[in-house]
Image (cartoon, helix red, strand yellow):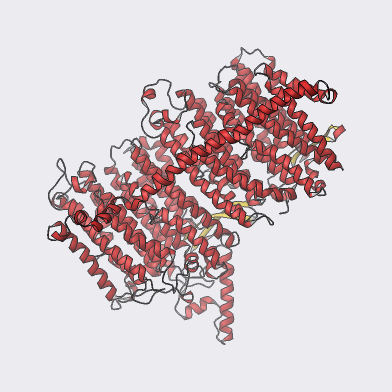
Amino acid sequence: MADKVWIIPALPALSFLLTLAFGKRTPGKGHFFGLAAVGIAFVLSLVTAGQWLARDTAHDAVGGLDDVPAQCATAVHSVAEEEAGAAHEATSNHGASRPTVAAEGEGEGEHFTRPVVRCVDWFTSGDVKFTAGTIVDGQSVMMLVVVTLISLLVHVFSTDYVHGDRRYTHYFAFLSLFTASMLFFVLSDNLLQMIVGWELVGVCSFALIGHWWEEKPNSDAALKAFLTNRVGDMGLLVGAVILFFAGGQRFHVLDINALANSGKISHTLLLIASCCLIAAVMSKSGQFILHTWLPDAMAGPTPVSALIHAATMVVAGIYMVARLYPVFFHGLSIGGSSINLLAVVGSVTGLFGALLGFVQSDIKKTLAYSTVSQLGFMVAALGVGAWTAAMFHLFTHAFFKACLFLGAGSLSHACHHSFNMVDDMGGLRKIMPKTFATYVIAMLSLAGFPLVTAGFWSKDEILAGTGGMNDANGTYYFVLVMLLLGAFCTAAYMTRTVWYAFFGEFRGHGHPHESGPRITIPLIVLSVLAVVAGFVNLPEYFSFLPESALLRFEHAIEPVGVFFPGHGQGFTHAGFNPVLATIATLIGFAGIGLTWAFYTGKLKVLEGLAGRNKLAGLGKRILVNKYYLDWLYTDVITGFVKGPLARATYWVNQNVLDGIVNGAGKGAVGTGRWVYDKIDQTVVDGSVNGIAGLAGATGGGLRKAQSGRVQEYAALFFAAAALLAGVIVVAVGS
Amino acid sequence: MDKYNWALPVVTFLPLAGALVMMLLPKEEEQLHKAIALLTSLATLAVGVFVFLQFDYGNGHFQFLVDRSWIEVINSRFIMGIDGLSLPLFGLTLAVVPLVIIYSWNHIPDPGNPKAFLALMLILETGMIGSFVAEDLILFFVFFEIVLLPMYFMIGVWGGPERKYASIKFFVYTLFGSALMILSFLALYQHAHTFDMRQLRELSATIAHGTQLLIFGGMFVGFGIKVPMFPFHTWLPDAHTQAPTQGSVILAAVLLKLGTYGFVRIAINILPEAAKSWAPVIAVLAVIGIIYGALGCLAQTDMKRLIAFSSVAHMGFVMLGIATLTRHGINAAMFGMVAHGLITGMLFFVAGSVKDRFHTLEIKRLGGMLIQMPKMGWILGFASMASLGLPGLAGFWGEFPAILSAYSPAAGLSVGLFRTLMVIASLGTVLAAGYLLWLYQRTAFGTPPEEFADDPHVHDVVLTEWIAWAPFLLGIVVFGVAPGLMFNVTETALKALNLGW
C-alpha cells in the first residue's frame, strides 16, 4: 500500500467530482460518494499504518533510504553516503571494523525509520526536474489515520446534523474535496506540492465557512479566513523559494532536511527561511497575531469546525514545521537555547488564546479560542525541540477537540441552532446524557485530568520538553511559565462551558432532546479515543510496564536518519518528571475548582470584579475587544488599503498618467495642425507627402466609422517616426 | 521538417481567405456569415492541430520553416517558423478565435452586422497568428500592425458609450509604440542588413553598447505599451471597458501577449546584453505594475474595469519573470501568458454575459448571482480562484515560478534588488485575493437585489456559452494539474535558444 498511497487522496477527490455531478440523484441526496470514499480511504490508511508499523523496526544498510528512489530525492542520498564515508573513516581510524552507518547503528541498537517515497516527473524548468510524489513515514501515516478517521466520523455526524440543508450536496462535495486536499498535503514529498495542498485546503475552508453565504457575516468570515491566510502564505512562498535555492534547486523535503541537517545550508538562510515559514504557520495554525480569522470561521457548519478548524486543517502549519524540522531546529538554534521565535509565538498564543476563551458566550467561539491556544502548545513544543510531543499533542487534540466541537453541535441541535451557552442552554446534563458524558470526558482530556486522559500525557510531554525542570533540548523557562498559565486558563474556561451548558436551569426555549445515533456514536467513539489515545506514548519512567508498551508513538512516528536532527546535534528527548506532572495536575484542578466555586456562588470575591476594579475592567475590555486586533486589521489596515490608498492610486492613474496621455494627444493634434498649416504646405511638402498619403489612405477607411482624427495622429506619428528613424540611422551608421 | 512548410502560411492566411469570401456575400445573410466564420476558424484550428501533432517536441529549434524571398530591396524575407516559445501562444490563438465566434452566435453586440464583425475577427486572427510565427522583423511588424485595425474597429463600432475615446486612445497609443519599434528594427537593419531574427543575435553582438541600449529602448516602449506595462497601461482599462465582450476576450487572451512575446522573441533574444542593462528597469516597472494594478482594482466600481485592471497586475508577473533573464523566469512568463489568456478571457466572458442579462456591470447593483444563476456564479468563482493564483489551476504556474525566479536572477543582475522585488511581488498575491474575493462576495454571495429579483432576462448559462467556455475551464484545470504540458515545451525551446545567461 505504501507505494500506491496516492489512491487515498484520489478517492475523496473522485468523490468530489461525482458528488457535484450526480450527488443529487444518489440515495441520501449527496452523502453517498463522500461516505464511501472516506470510508475506504480510512481502511486503506489503517492498512498503510499497519505496514508502516511492521516495517518501522527493521534495519537496513543504506541509512534508511532503500525506499527513496534517487530520481525523487538525490541530495539525501549523497548526504547519507558522505556521512557513511565519514563514519567509516572515523571507525577505521579507531581500528574498529564497522564499515557502514547501518552496521554502527546495529551495534548501538539504533534503528532507522525508512520513509517510502514514490514520485513521477511533473515538469522541467531551468534544467530542474520537478517531481510529484508521496512520502510515507511515521508522520504522514499518523496524519492519514487522523484525517480519514475524523473525516469519516464528521461525515456520519453530518448526515443527521446538516440534514435538509439548502445546499446539502455541495456541503458533502466540499467535505470530500477538503479531505482529498488535506490528504494530498499530508502525503506531499516536496515543498511545491505542499504549497498546492496548503492552498487547496484553504479554499475548501473558504467555501465551507461561507457555506451559508446568503448572510453577509458568513461570507465576511470566509473572506477574512482566506485573506488572513494569504498574508501568511506570502511567508510560505518566500520561505519555499529560499529553501529551494538554498538546497541547490530542490523542493524535496528529504533533500532539504538532509542538507539543512548536515550544515550544507548556511545558518542565515535557514534562519530567514524559518522566519518566513513561521508567518505561514501563524496564519494557517491560528497563531497570535494572525489567529483572528479562526474564531470567525465558526460561522460555518459545526462539523466543519470540528474537522477543518480544529482537528486537521489548522494543524497543517504544525505539520509543515514538523516536516521541515531540521530547517527550524538549526535555523532557530533550538537545541541548547532558551528562547526563539517559534517558542515565543507558540507560548504567547498558548496563553493569550486561552484568556480569550473566558469572555465568550458562544460555546463554539470558546472552543475556537481553545483551539488557538492548543495549537500554541504544539508550536511551542516544536519551538523547544519537543518534536514528538508536538505530534503527540496534535494526535490527541484531534480527538478530544473534535469531540468537543461535535458535542457543541449536538447541544445546538437541541437548542434551536443556538450556540449561546449563556442565554439558550443550561441544565442539559439530564436531557442529553450521552452528549454530556462525552463532552465532559473530552473536556477533562483537554484540561489534562491526570493519568487517565490523553490530553494529560501529551501536554505533560510538552511541558517536560521545555526543559524548565529537567534535561531537554534547552531551558525554556518562559515557555514553561506561559504554558502552565495557559493550562490553568484552559481548565477554567472549559469548566465554564460545562457549567453553562449542562448545569443550572435550562434557559432556552422549547424542549431539548438527546440527538440521534448518527450524532452520538461519533461522539462516543471520539470520547473513547480522547482517553485511550494517551496510552500509546507512555513515558519510559513507567519502567514497571513491559517495554513494548512504552513510547510506542515516538518509535513509530519520529524520523531517524540523516534527514532529522539526531543526538549528535543536540536533539534529545525530555523524560517524564513526576514533580512537573504533579504541578500541572494541581494547576488544572485549581482551574476547574476555582471556576466551579465561582459559578456555584462560593467565590463571592470575584463576582463583579471587572466592574469594581479598574485594572480588571480594563483587562476585560481588552479581552472582549480581542486585543483590538480585529479593529487594527479590518478597520485600520484593510480599510486604508481598500479606501484611501486604492482611491489615491486610481486618482493618480486617471489624472496624472492619463492626463499626460491625453495632454500629449491634444498637444500632438495641436502641433499637427500647426505643422500642417505653417510648415507642411510650404517647407517639407515633398518629403512628408508620401508618408502622409499612406496614412491618409488608411485613415480614409476609418473615417466612415470614426471622427477622422486618427489619420492626423497617424500621419503625425509616422512623420515623427520617419524623422527619428533618420536621426538614428545616421547615428548608428556613423 | 520542412516537409510541411505549407502549414504555417496556410494557418496564417486561411482566416484572411475566409474574410474575403465573407466580403463577397451580402450582409443580410447573417447565419451564413456566422457559419463561414466558424468553419474558417475551425479549419484553421484543424491545420493547427496538424501542426501540433507533427511538431517534434524534443527539438527546440524552428520547425515548419518557410524561407522565401519577399521584399528584396530591403532584404526582408518571408520567414515563418514555429518553436516551443511560439507554440503555446499559437495554440491559444487558434483555440480562442472559434470559441469567440461560437459565443457570437447569439451575442452579436450592437449595432449588429455579423458580416463585418466576424470578418474583422478573422482578419485579426491572421494578424495574431502571423505575429507568432513570423521570423522576419518586417513580416512580424506587418502582422503586428494588421492586428491593430480590426481591434480598433471592433471597439470603435461595437463598443460601449465611450467607444470613440477608447478606440482612438488604443489605436494611437499602440501606433506610437509601433513607431519606436520599427525605428529599432531599422536601426538593427542598418547594422546587420537583414531582418532575419535567426541571424540577428549574432550580427547584433558587435553593435556598440550605447546603441544597443537605444535600440532596446525603442522595442521596450513598443512592446511595453502592448503588454501593457506601467506606466503605459492607461489605454487598457478604457479599451477593455468599452470593447464588446468578444473584443475584450481576444484583447486579454491574445493581443496583450504580442507585447510579452515580442520581449522574449525579439528584444531580449536579439539584444541579450542590452536586455541585461534594461532588466532592472523592466523588473521595477513590472512589480510596480503588480501592486499598482491591484490597488487600481480595489478602487473600481465596475466589474469589467476591475478585470481590466487585474491584467496590469498579472502581466506584471509575466514581465517580472522575463526580467530575471533566467529560464525559470521566462518559462514562468510563457506559462503566465497562456494562463492569463485563459483565465482573464474567461472572466471577460462572464462579465459580458452578466452585462447581457443585467445591462449593468456596476458592482454595487449586482448580488446573489449564485441564487439567480448558480452555474454562472460557480464559473465566476472558479475563474476568480484561478485568477488569484490558486495552486492546482493554471494561474499559479505563471505566478509562483515568476516569484521564484526573482530570487536568483541571471548573473550580473542585482540580487538584492530582485529579491526585494520578489517580496513585494508576493504581496501582490495577497492583494489579488482581496480584489477578486471582494468582487465575488459583492456579486455572487448574498441575495439578488430587488431591481433584478424577478427580471425575466436573468437566466443561467446557455448552450453557446457552455460550448464557448468549456474549453477555457478545462484548459485552466488541465494546465493547472499538468504544468509540464507547457513548461516542457518552452523549456526545450529556451534551451535551444541558449540565451547564454
Position of A30 with respect to A564 (left or right) is left
Task: In this rendered view, identify the residue nearer to me: A481 or B111.
Answer: A481
Position of A734 with respect to A230 (left or right) is right
Q: Residue at x 34, y 47 (%)?
A: A296
Residue B47 visible? The answer is: yes
Q: How many marks?
A: 0
> Can you say which quadrant of the picture contains the N terminus of chain A?
bottom left
Residue A487, above or below A35: below
Position of A382 with respect to A589 (left or right) is right
The answer to which image quadrant residue A552 occupies is bottom left
Residue B394, x across and y down, in percent: 54, 43
Position of A395 with respect to B30 (left or right) is left
> Can you say which quadrant of the picture contains the C terminus of chain A?
top right
The answer to which image quadrant residue B292 occupies is top right
Q: Residue at x 74, y 48 (%)?
A: B274
Task: In this rendered view, identify the residue nearer to me: A271 or A69.
Answer: A271
Residue A53 visible? The answer is: no
Residue A231, above or below A561: above
Q: Residue at x 31, y 69 (%)?
A: A460
Residue A647, x across and y down, in percent: 49, 37
Residue A179, x across and y down, in percent: 40, 49
Residue A68, above or below B283: below
Task: In this rendered view, identify the residue nearer to me: B411 or B476.
Answer: B411
Residue A207, x across and y down, in percent: 39, 42
Query: For the view shown, which residue lies furthest in the bottom direction?
Result: A95
